[in-house]
Amino acid sequence: MLSQQELSDRLELQDLVFFYSHLIDTKSFDTLREVFTEDAHIDYSAFGGSVGNLEETIAYLKQAVADEIFPNSQHLNANLQFTVNGDSATGRVMCFNPMEMKLPDGGLQVFLIGLWYVDEYRRTPAGWRISRRVEEKSWVFNAPDFMNL
């Protein structure tokens, strides 16, 4: 049985993951500073993104939006798994993400993206923060009717 502290920690970590997803979906990239530690390492390379620190990641995401290569997204998190060890924790997050991408002919294609993230967390004076996020695996499904369900 989980202790009250471990249950509280797990709920806070879950909230952190959902908040992260909300910030990505709303393209509130500057607010990612409230989610990650200052020295965070972020690896989005499995999906063709960047590997780097927080500031490099924020710059990459902003440029992707400016270049119109960042698709509309809506994260659907599932199967969040956390192991808490005092002031540090590890976790795996499965995320499904229907994404709309513009085609060169002006059309729109919808894909369903599946992702596994492997995270490391640290407790800071401001609460839990992600200190390392690695996209472990991703897969893409062509889902032209997914958004019309």
Image: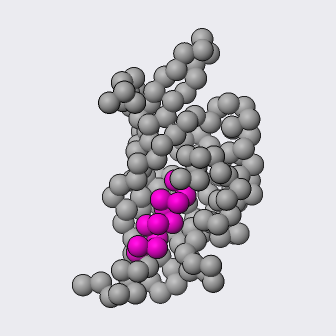
Q: Residue at x 68, y 45 (%)?
A: 61
Q: Residue at x 46, y 47 (%)?
A: 75
Left or right: where does residue 55 sit relative to residue 14?
right
The reply to whether residue 20 is in sight is yes
Q: How many numbered circles does the render carry?
A: 0
Residue that sits furthest to the top in the current view:
105
Q: Position of residue 74 (x, y in %)?
A: 48, 43
**Does residue 53 lie above or below 144 as drawn?**
below
Q: Give the residues drawn in magenta, as a range.
A: 10-21
Majority secondary structure in the magenta region:
helix
- Which quarter of the image is occupied by the C terminus? top left
Q: Position of residue 69 (x, y in %)?
A: 64, 32
Left or right: where does residue 95 sit relative to residue 46?
left
Q: Quadrant of residue 145?
A: top left
| Between 73 and 142, the one nearer to me in the picture | 73
Q: Position of residue 78 (x, y in %)?
A: 35, 55
**Does residue 96 lie above or below 122 as drawn?**
above
The reply to whether residue 138 is in sight is no
Left or right: where does residue 57 sit relative to residue 1?
right
- Which quarter of the image is occupied by the N terminus? bottom left
Asked which colour scheme the image uses, the reply is one colour
Q: Position of residue 54 (x, y in %)?
A: 70, 59
Q: Residue at x 52, y 84 (%)?
A: 87
Residue 124 shown in magenta: no
Residue that sits furthest to the left in the current view:
1
| Between 125 and 44, the one nearer to me in the picture | 125
